[in-house]
Image: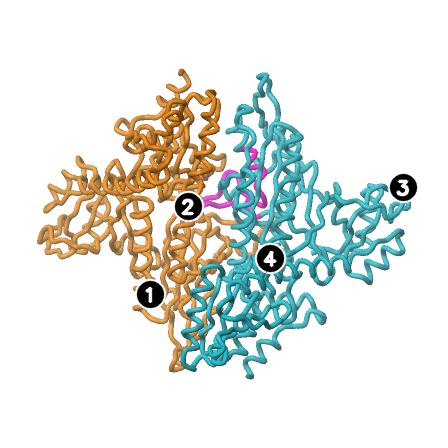
Chain colours: A orange, B cyan
Amino acid sequence: MAKEKKLVEAITSMEEDFAQWYTDVVKKAELIEYSNVKGCMILRPNGYAIWENIQKELDRRFKETGVENVYMPLFIPESLLQREKDHVEGFAPEVAWVTHGGMEPLQERLCVRPTSETLFCDMYSNIIQSYRDLPKLYNQWCSVVRWEKTTRPFLRSMEFLWQEGHTAHATEEEAEERTIQMLNVYADFCEQILAIPMIKGKKTDKEKFAGAHSTYTIEALMHDGKALQSGTSHNFGDGFAHAFDIQYTDKDNKLQYVHQTSWGMSTRIIGAIIMVHGDDSGLVLPPRIAPVQVMIVPIAQHKEGVLNKAYELRDRLAKSFSVKVDDSDKSPGWKFSEQEMRGIPTRIEIGPKDLEANQAVIVRRDTREKIVVSLDEIETKLAQVQETMQQEMLERARAHRDAHTYQAANYEEFKELIANKPGFVKAMWCGDEACELKIKEETTATSRCMPFEQEHVADTCVCCGKPAKTMVYWGKAY
Amino acid sequence: MAKEKKLVEAITSMEEDFAQWYTDVVKKAELIEYSNVKGCMILRPNGYAIWENIQKELDRRFKETGVENVYMPLFIPESLLQREKDHVEGFAPEVAWVTHGGMEPLQERLCVRPTSETLFCDMYSNIIQSYRDLPKLYNQWCSVVRWEKTTRPFLRSMEFLWQEGHTAHATEEEAEERTIQMLNVYADFCEQILAIPMIKGKKTDKEKFAGAHSTYTIEALMHDGKALQSGTSHNFGDGFAHAFDIQYTDKDNKLQYVHQTSWGMSTRIIGAIIMVHGDDSGLVLPPRIAPVQVMIVPIAQHKEGVLNKAYELRDRLAKSFSVKVDDSDKSPGWKFSEQEMRGIPTRIEIGPKDLEANQAVIVRRDTREKIVVSLDEIETKLAQVQETMQQEMLERARAHRDAHTYQAANYEEFKELIANKPGFVKAMWCGDEACELKIKEETTATSRCMPFEQEHVADTCVCCGKPAKTMVYWGKAY
């Protein structure tokens, strides 16, 4: 019992210290191990398996829209990075530089890719000749490096895993359409699979990606009321095409510049899963993304028939679920704590009495509801429980977000809300970057996005009081 | 027709210049694009899709043996790389060094991982405490960097994709068992999926991995008679455990060092697929690894009903095969050439006459055999054709290898064979590294492995004439 208490006690309560709670969960659920490489994290099996499931789901959705996967070099020569002016300004301060290969200094230093626009552009300029070569819809799964000073597991680290899609199109319209299409793929994936509702919108010029004409984003609200940018999709227009000379011959035999997009989602989204759904017992994973969906815990497993029944049940359920039996020599209570810490969506308890009654007990991770079911119909019941849990997790997340979304008509209200009510604040903005900067400086809140679903919450800019037509979601963010 | 001729003519014949043939296939089949980053390749969709299939198959096989995936940092601090003496000597001369992060020089330089033994050891020393924590069976899919001066697509490049498994065990026996188990996983995968027969054996001390007690290898013979090391599995004993202080408390509460293994397979194996199965029309992919297994080519596609029938057939076949329709405005002959160049295992031709007769023509990529089949049973027939093709490709590869495997009783025979008969030479070896070095210097052949299936082809060492008990496969290698 002493050991069991220790496991539970070791987690800080969310209300007491959210940041510490987060770190505790990440460590105790064995998602991450800190490495001796400053700023780099080790993704342990429990953490990496979540990423594998995210990959599988997203990759399928990408491919359904015609996207193909490629792999580009890890390194970018300095001269290539410098080709697009805004882009290099955005990224050069935060890249890692390779200066030596083997024993010899390099003639030109190479940066470790912080993102691969320049490499894709360089390739596209070689392989695109005619309108027949368009569109190019390429994506890659890889790691990127950004030299961050402060790091937090999943949310900010020197190296992180992501996918980056890079497309080239014949027309401006097609590029814009693809930009929005991929944003929708991200938002649908987050809602349907991760049970996280998203605000879809456009970034202000100040917040957009280095080199982009426009950046679209999906923004989620964490349990502590802070926002998390969860995926972005950029329309580059023909800016990179001019910088990298990517031209094609159109049907009238005229040279035209291509229009490009890029879009990315990273392991950061695992931070969102933790901070949207987790509780004081640890992680809570939506059934559709959980690497292990069901943990069978035998009760009094030394009693005759119990373990065999548990294995039999596992083999039955394995046809439709990802399922494991915890047959270790730990006590059931200890096993429950571990299963809860790891966020496994459902637990099945089965002991000697259940065997007699031809039943088992399903326990939901989120509500802890216990459902006694006959073994004859356990597949159906389990599927129902997981489906209900998935839906209710999304509803709860949406209700939490809506309950923490406020609106402000003037600067006093705005400052009051930002200071005292963690959450999103909807407020009008005149479009002037000066107002954005002032708000950030005085409140630490940033413009999260100009949502596609606009509302007219006031006539004037929340900051300067001048006429304003655009509603912006503001908030403190990770 | 001019264009079609050009595509076919553009490939150098294998017999004329095998190296140029290889380069032509890699480029024309659009597997690879050279990048402006010296020594780095771009894996294009046709190439990367093969790697994705390899990953899927291998990953499933790994997981069936209990392996879990993780992700480790890209960088290794210099002090960590230096911890194991043999290992650093083997790798330090060929690593890329990061010396600056953002605008600032680093206090300690970091190398880009050439392999991750040191990182795994560092983690294992943190997370392994008790015998209950063992075994650890971790693997990662990633890219690694080795500063190579000369590079060739897939076979040798500065950066390449691979998987590296790293395990830790309580006993020496368990580690040895795992080393052999993973070698068998590789060999079975290569035979069953890639249709490439492998020689399994042990590397000599000279050829073993830096820091390993023993290295096992699978060796394949390419069409030109050169060998290709296709996968390796290393037993480290407790050498790394001592260097990194990885100890656990055993059941008697005594501290013990763990025993470790590592094993890897890389994109190099795609080079083997090309060089074992390819022909003068391009790539030939075994059906079980082909990203597209069937290309439907409509004949006279402007005629009524042809295209619709092709789409209908695609939708039917898509339930069991990976299938595409080439409905582009190219001529059938051009489409045939492209499909052959890309190595798509089977083509289905369907035209107006076939529609009338309720039939289609299946064409095998390897033998070009044409099989007329009724549309009513095309699924079954196609499955049979692909199965036969898969088996026959393996048999042909084995026959080719066996026909190019020789044996030498003395040094004269050996030199004669190496100089004039491309292939493996089986010959006895006394165990002295001096003989290995002499053979390499005088013939450029290297010891490929000491095969598990030993034969007694002579009483004495092929080089020095002293008594010898070990038979070695020798050959020139990629």
Q: CA distance from mark 3 to mark 4?
A: 40 Å
Query: Magenta stretch containing residue B114, yes or no?
Result: yes
**Pointer 1: what residue?**
A175
Q: Could you tell me the amino acid type at mark 3? A: Pro
- Residue A92: x percent and y percent? 41, 52
| Residue density around tag 1, few if under 14, some if 14–19, many if 20 or more, within 10 Å | many
Residue at left 47%, top 27%? Answer: A307
Q: Are marks 4 and 2 on the same chain?
A: no
Residue B465 versus residue A114: which sits nearer the camera?
A: B465
Q: Are marks 2 and 3 on the same chain?
A: no
Q: Are marks 2 and 3 in contact (CB under 8 Å)?
A: no
Marked residue chain, label 2 = A
- Residue B317: x percent and y percent? 47, 64
Q: Which residues are magenta?
A: B96-122
Q: CA distance from mark 4 to mark 2?
A: 26 Å
- The disc placed on residue A53 is 2
User: Can residue A103 be seen at all in this image of the molecule?
Assistant: no
Marked residue chain, label 1 = A
Marked residue chain, label 3 = B
Q: Are marks 4 and 1 on the same chain?
A: no
Q: CA distance from mark 2 to mark 3?
A: 57 Å
| Residue density around tag 3, few if under 14, some if 14–19, many if 20 or more, within 10 Å | some
Mark 2, secondary structure of its residue:
helix
